[in-house]
Amino acid sequence: MTTAASLEQIAAQLKGRDFLGLVDFSPEEIRYLLDLAVEIKRKHKAGEAYQPLKGKSLGMIFEKSSTRTRVSFEVGMYQLGGQALFLSRNDIQMGRGETILDTAQVMSRYLDGMILRTFGHRNVVELARGATIPVINALSDQSHPCQALADYQTALEHKGKLEGLKVAYIGDGNNVLHSLMMGAAKLGMHFSSASPEGYDPSERSVQSSIEAAAETGGSVRILRDPREAIEGADIVYTDVWASMGFEEEQKEREKAFKNYQVNEELVKYANPDYLFMHCLPAHRGEEVSEGVIDGKNSVIFDEAENRLHAQKAIMAAIM
């Protein structure tokens, strides 16, 4: 049982931290953030003001375009009482050769927190290394921890629990898979993925997730067969076959992933009350059939909405 004293201790531990990946957080800290997200959402729906970041500013550096990430962070910071500044690479000197370390140190003199949506994970690590304020990974090629937190908030709301549930991911072994897998491992869930040969998740992410699962009673399995992966799943997840930056591989990937579509035939192997999730944007008719993504088991728009509340929880906790 979590006591008020232990909650205060976790809150103190989170203050001032960077949020670069779920691997950096204990199961208790992740659950604290999930519970905070649920409570922040409740307050928002009830019209209760919650503005712990009044007078604070968030810098949002975007090297990759976005819909959900930009809007949810900008609106979220406003709802928390602060302001957000959108900064594309071309808006600041990083786009003209200023080092990430110099940018980090300058921004730390102006802001109370930063997010970075970037290609290389080393960029967000470098930004955090140079900054004296909290830095949030809003997506990198290695991980997408904000998305995973929103995903598990959604699962918690619909299922009432997380520990012991089975998550099946079908598709590309990308940043979304990495964060989803680590989150499942940290939360005592059972994770299975199926990807075609050559598109597996990184060995480092798999190994660290297996180690985390060993401590929580969860499990991690990396498979080839989508049917084996999805068997008895409580949550079924997929993502586009060609993520941003891999568009030139679209035709090649369509061939490799042709047997990995999440469709009505495949989901028969999941539990009848499974939740279908997708981080969006989605390509209907490619990685998922219209019948599944628009069907009764789909919670994709709850999931998208929870990006707002999960990220508000992150900002409120660390800023």
Image: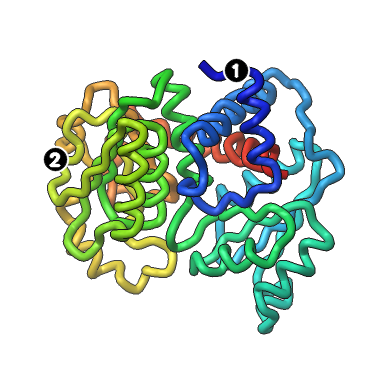
Give above or below for 76 relative to 63. Answer: above
Q: Identify which amino acid the numbered label 2 is placed on.
A: Arg
Please report the residue visible at 34 percent of the width from the left and 73 percent of the height from the top. 248
For mark 2, give the secondary structure. helix
Q: Kindly report which numbered mark, 2 or 1, lies closer to the viewer in this rendering.
A: 1
Q: Which of 221/151 is in front?
A: 221
For mark 1, give the secondary structure. loop
Which of the 4 image quadrants contains residue 61?
A: bottom right
Which residue matches tag 1? 3
Mark 2 vs 1: CB contact within 8 A: no
Q: Which of 8/318 is in front?
A: 8
Percent position (x, y) of residue 283? 35, 52
Percent position (x, y) of residue 265? 15, 36
Percent position (x, y) of residue 244? 43, 64
Instruction: Locate residue 24 relative to residue 274 in the image: left or right.
Output: right
Which residue matches tag 2? 227
Viewport quadrant of the C terminus: top right
Q: Which of 80/243 is in front?
A: 80
Q: Identify which amino acid the numbered label 1 is placed on.
A: Thr
Residue 115 visible, this orientation: yes
Can you tell which mark lies on residue 177? none
Give above or below for 113 relative to 309. Answer: below
Q: Which of 243/124 is in front?
A: 124
